[in-house]
Image (tube, helix red, strand yellow):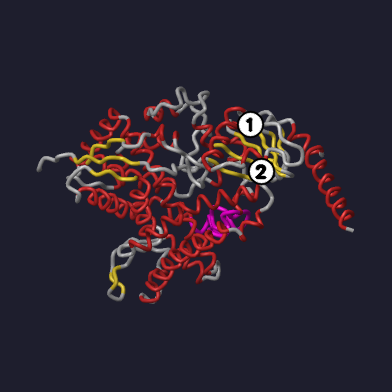
Amino acid sequence: MFIILLLLILTVYLTCHIYTHYGPDGRLLNKIPGPLGLPIIGNVLLVRSTREGLWKVLCYLTEQYYPIGKVWAFFTVAVTIRHPDDLEVILNSTKHTDKSRVYDILHPWLGTGLLTSAGSKWQSRRKILTPTFHFNILQQFVEILIEEGERMTNSLKNAEDSVTKDLIPFISEHTLNAICETAMGTSLQGLGSFQQQYRKAVHQMGEFIVYRLLRQWLKNDWIFSLTPRGREQAKLLKILHGFTEKIIKERKDYHKLTNGQYLKNLNKDAVADEEIIGIRRKRLAMLDLLIQASQEGLLTDKDIREEVDTFTFEGHDTTSSGICFTLALLAEHKDIQERVRKEIDVIMKENQEKLTMKSLQDLQYLERCIKEALRLYPSVFFISRNTSEKVQLKSYLIPAGTLLHLNIFGVHRDPKFWPNPEIFDPDRFLPDKIRNRHPYSYLPFSAGPRNCIGQRFAILEMKAMIAPLIYNFYLEPVDYLKDLRIGADILLRPFTLHRLKFIPIAKKCI
């Protein structure tokens, strides 16, 4: 009986394998170049590696199979693309907007919020949240971003001497403060240890999510929950969800205390300063829109947490990564750092050493530096989509239901579109050079219908954080970018120390 059952399973398995590889879709996919695989398991052995090894494999495959390649694992094929023409076909389409099943590994943490949702749910969430990042609202947020940048700078000034900092924990503390006080309307002052636990858990989740992705790829994801790593991930989720639930509760309590008067006026002028029951009215926050939508029956408490989890993570971690790499590049390029400093000095002198919305917008050279840093080190280095129907790319016809890997890191360093791509050159983003460049060769915030909803917020925040640091300190590298160890993660970041020295600049009294 056992032998018959085994033969039956083997027959079904081989039938599925033959159909997958040699059926109509398989024949189309077999035309795409890729590494030779073993029978049945395909290219599975390529991903049986460390996070660092996996990153090196991804980089190798990107260069070896340009501009398109594929890898197989059992019945699954992943196609990677990096040519701007192909990226435009997918990203500019209203049909191929659904994220691939790769993002399923984020569901235990982020649920199906704006990042991971699909179809009508994604459309409705996007509609609810878009007003949060309207230009007029950003003007309210800028004051907080500037205050947080000053707070970060002052923490270094208090040392009264040169300070060496590991960038990721140092910067992420302040970007987390910024997203919570702006988008969530909640200050983290006095929650230092709780905040630190959250940031540590976010970074640890990267390792667990990559590990789980490999289990999913190797077709034994069910084993994950039984392993020590699976149990450890459950502990991290408790910390992450506990943090965001505390934020939501605090904001709800505020509205109860003010009898919901602020929510009633959300669609009116939400920027005026006035007193409501002895408490100063807070600025419009994304969380307020979510709470209001829940009171109208459009969202549940679980829906609210999905979006708060999503924006708290994405709103602080991606920006932190961008700031860290920008500071590191400026530290290693003293001439460019000095040019940024001169621009900031002029702006500060004109504004009595105070930053404003307009002065941040006037920091054009700093903005070019940030854009160039995001080209070399995009925080989100890939996007994964699922094709909803057959789609003709530049050279190949892709079947419906194919998992597509959109390689942002690869296209950003493509010498066909970026001469000397490894060189840090902010002048690549001068208006005359942008004009004739392929619009889909630069995608730090994605593009098309599912582009990043907070990209203007992110640029303003990065300026507000970086400007006071450059104004008050010389930057010196301790750990060089060429020596950093990068590993496969949710975002692009090193998993080793990334230290920078901040040397105070003596300021003349004015």
Question: Label 1, on which residue?
Answer: 68
Tell me the quadrant of the picture where the N terminus can be found: bottom right
207 is within the stretch colored magenta: no
Dominant secondary structure of the magenta stretch?
A: helix
Q: Which residues are magenta?
A: 105-129
- Residue 206 versus residue 482 in the image, above or below: below
Relative to 433, residue 129 above or below:
below
**Quick one: 126 or 443, which is closer to the camera?**
443
On the image, the x and y values in percent for residue 175 come to 36, 52
Q: Determine if residue 112 is in view.
A: no
Q: x, y (%) of residue 366?
A: 32, 36
Lower position in the chain sequence, tag 1 or tag 2: 1
Quadrant in the picture for residue 79: top right
Mark 2 is surrounded, within 10 Å at the Cα level, by few (under 14), some (14 to 19) or many (20 or more) other residues, namely many
- Point out residue 161 in the picture as x, y percentages from the top left corner: 18, 44
Residue 106 highlighted magenta (yes or no): yes
Q: Quadrant of residue 108?
A: bottom right
- Decide if residue 10 is in sight here: yes
Residue at point 46% right, 26% down?
Answer: 421
Rounded to the nearest whole Å, what is the CA distance between mark 1 and mark 2? 13 Å
Circle 2 — which element?
strand
Type of amino acid under label 2 = Leu
Q: Residue at x 19, y 41 (%)?
A: 504
Query: What is the quadrant of residue 119 in the picture?
Result: bottom right
Which mark is drawn over residue 403? 2
